[in-house]
Image (cartoon, rainbow, N blue to C red):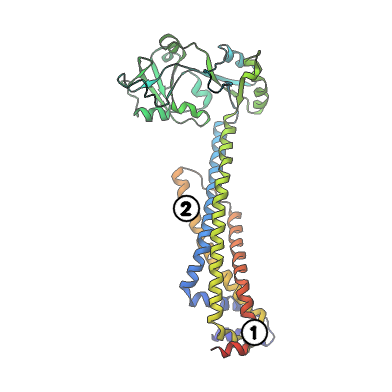
């Protein structure tokens, strides 16, 4: 109180209340009622931590997606026949890959063909237990076109695609319980045993291959009675000419019925899935805003209690010459200090949460510094608004009434 009285005497004598004096007076309540101030700041901290975590995880996820797209490239096009719902599996003309390869700006073309067979761990498993695994015939250069990678073993080649050899997608290997390639592991495929020569890593731009088993076109035709027609083609183009190539693919693949051919970019699907997460992120941001509102209500309650408990103190300050403005600004500043305390703690919790989660997912942590500044500023504004009405109540107290209530 001596320092506060000295500051107010100086204000009464005509000098303006210094910022250091204002902060000293405003911090008096939080310093003397630490538990109450901590609980009030906790509500703000929860809201700020939620907002920081949502913003940080969103930005880190988007940064990871962009890095992934840059790595995989947005110049991959997929060509498939338009499929009637409930109808038989449609195919593309057998000569379609060769025709597409003649298009200018096309760098690579690979295809997969449907095989009417299922893959099992052995020949004693009932035929009905397919586990939704699909068998495809595949070109040897498919992995290069998709820019995929092997987890174990090797992909099909010009030599192995003529023999009963199979490459498993990542989920297929997990479903069948195959975790290594030793040259002795065989699977029952189309009533024939095939040797597992490789296991793929997940392929983001061709997720259907993760639950597939791949064999060569020649062996699929001989042993599995496939007709050699592709069901999907993967076309890698010049990055600057993807759209122009896409515009002529349908007519090139099926000149008689271009409408029966579907052309798309898998990278667009990835971007669309990322955009679909915005609704969930907006929900989390809404929850953070609600938490901030709850914190603001807590601050209002604390400031009301502070005004009631400090009526005598307020009366003394008014008697020493403090104006209503200085009394009001003191309580608003106190409210802002509590909010800033919660905001700082919330930012630290949010940043740590984003860093830990990003590290676990092997993402690059990306939290815009400007976002942190804006969030802290918003918390300060919330604190100022929350403390406004209690501050007006304190400023309106008459000195004689406040001292009489002692």
Q: Residue furthest front?
A: 86
Which residue is at 57% across, 30% downward? 266
The mark that comes first in sequence, 1 or 2, is: 1
Q: Using the image as rendered, state which of residue 317 and residue 373 is in the foreground.
A: 317
Image quadrant of residue 290? bottom right
Tag count: 2
Quarter the N terminus occupies? bottom right
Q: CA distance from mark 1 to mark 2?
A: 45 Å
Q: Is residue 23 visible?
A: yes
Left or right, 10 with respect to 352, comes to right
Quarter of the view holding residue 263? top right
Q: Is residue 77 above or below residue 404?
A: above
Q: Secondary structure at mark 2?
A: helix
Q: Position of residue 4 (x, y in %)?
A: 57, 83
Residue 337, disc:
none
Furthest toward the right, the residue is: 14
Q: 215 or 388: nearer the eye?
A: 388
User: Is residue 19 in sight in this rendering?
Assistant: no
Task: Identify whether 290 is placed above or below 213.
Answer: below
Q: Residues within 10 Å of mark 1 (few under 14, many from 20)?
A: many
The residue wearing badge 2 is 353
The residue at 51%/68% (across/down) is: 40
Q: Which mark is residue 322?
A: 1
């Amino acid at each position: 109180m001596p320092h506060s009285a000295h500051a107010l005497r100086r204000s009464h004598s005509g000098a303006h209340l210094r910022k250091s004096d204002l902060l000293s007076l405003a911090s008096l309540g939080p310093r003397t009622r630490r538990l109450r101030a901590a609980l009030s700041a906790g509500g703000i901290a929860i809201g700020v931590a939620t907002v920081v975590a949502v913003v940080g995880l969103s930005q880190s996820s988007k940064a990871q997606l962009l890095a992934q797209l840059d790595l995989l490239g947005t110049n991959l096009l997929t060509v498939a026949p338009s499929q009637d719902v409930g109808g038989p599996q449609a195919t593309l003309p057998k000569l379609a890959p060769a025709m597409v390869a003649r298009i200018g700006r096309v760098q690579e073309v690979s295809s997969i063909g449907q095989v009417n067979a299922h893959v099992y761990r052995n020949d004693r498993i009932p035929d009905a237990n397919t586990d939704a695994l699909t068998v495809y015939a595949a070109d040897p250069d498919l992995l290069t076109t998709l820019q995929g990678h092997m987890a174990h073993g090797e992909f099909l080649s010009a030599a192995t695609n003529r023999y009963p050899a199979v490459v498993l997608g990542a989920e297929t290997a997990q479903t069948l319980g195959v975790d290594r390639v030793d040259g002795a592991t065989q699977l029952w495929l189309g009533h024939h045993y095939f040797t597992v020569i490789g296991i793929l890593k997940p392929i983001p731009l061709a997720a259907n291959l993760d639950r597939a088993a791949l064999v060569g076109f020649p062996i699929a035709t001989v042993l599995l009675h496939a007709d050699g027609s592709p069901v999907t083609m993967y076309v890698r183009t010049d990055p600057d000419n993807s759209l122009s190539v896409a515009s002529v693919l349908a007519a090139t693949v099926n000149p008689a019925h271009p409408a029966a051919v579907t052309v798309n970019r898998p990278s667009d699907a990835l971007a669309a899935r990322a955009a679909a997460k915005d609704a969930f992120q907006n929900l989390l941001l809404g929850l953070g805003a609600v938490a901030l509102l709850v914190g603001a209500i807590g601050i209002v309650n604390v400031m009301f209690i502070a005004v009631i408990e400090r009526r005598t103190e307020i009366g003394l300050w008014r008697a020493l010459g403090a104006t209503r403005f200085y009394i009001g600004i003191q309580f608003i500043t106190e409210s802002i200090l509590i909010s800033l305390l919660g905001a700082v703690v919330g930012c630290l919790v949010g940043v740590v949460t984003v860093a830990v989660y990003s590290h676990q997912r092997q993402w690059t942590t990306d939290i815009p510094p400007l976002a942190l500044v804006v969030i802290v500023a918003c918390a300060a504004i919330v604190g100022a608004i929350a403390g406004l009405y209690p501050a007006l109540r304190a400023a309106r107290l008459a000195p004689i009434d406040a001292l009489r209530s002692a």
